[in-house]
Image (cartoon, helix red, strand yellow):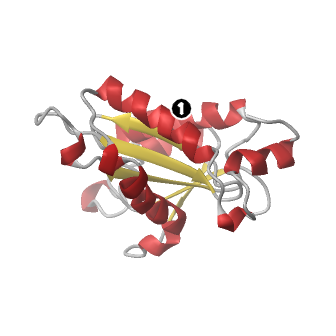
Amino acid sequence: MTYPGQRVQVDVKVVPRACVADPELRLFQYTAIDEFTRLRFLAAYPEQSTYSSADFLLKLRAWYARRGIQVECVQTDNGFEFTNRFSGSKRNLPTLFEKTAAELSIRHKLIRPYTPRHNGKLERQHRTDELRFYRHMRMYSLEDGRKQLAVYQRQSNDHIMTCLGMQSPNQVLAKYAGVMW
């Protein structure tokens, strides 16, 4: 990628049960990573659905826009929360996520089935989240989970990365845009 927003990878991760205090509560971490800057946007939802995915897309577009990034393309896997590609009878009906992307003029790119490496930045980041965040966290409610993810997101976007030439995603964005977030 040659500029911010050209392609943003999006995926969902189940929050480990050991991190959630209420045994009745299930949480899902939605993650977006800009391929150029590695800038991350995180959000917690109580369900993994096309509704949650569409809501996440609206929030991520607004969040990136406040940083001067126009999201042109989102890349996802073929999960039911993003597409009906493998649903049989509903194959030709767009999901709420796909409709929302079209309304926002964001191209939706699907990775080839059974190739999670094509969303590699997300897959690696989810493993990092396990080590840096979930092994040490306890979430008591959806709101608590959202607050903790927001703090972790800020720290993560300030974390220096080798792949960025020993800069943080915020530093790369600042160099590109001429501002600091």
Q: Using the image as rendered, state which of residue 101 and residue 121 is in the foreground.
A: 121
Quadrant containing the C terminus is top right
- Determine which residue is flagged by label 1: 59
Identity of the residue drawn at 44% across and 59% down: 128
Q: How many marks?
A: 1
Identity of the residue drawn at 39% across and 73% down: 113
Identity of the residue drawn at 42% across and 48% down: 94
Identity of the residue drawn at 37% across and 36% down: 44
Quadrant containing the N terminus is bottom right
Residue 119, relative to residue 21: is it above or below?
below
Q: Which secondary structure lies at badge 1?
A: helix
Q: Is residue 176 left or right of residue 128?
A: right
Q: Is residue 27 left or right of residue 173?
A: left
The image shows residue 78 at horizontal and vertical percentages of: 39, 62
The image shows residue 151 at horizontal and vertical percentages of: 50, 33
Residue 47, relative to residue 80: is it above or below?
above
The image shows residue 42 at horizontal and vertical percentages of: 48, 41
For this orientation, the residue located farthest to the right is 178
Whether residue 109 is visible to the viewer of this picture, yes or no, is: yes
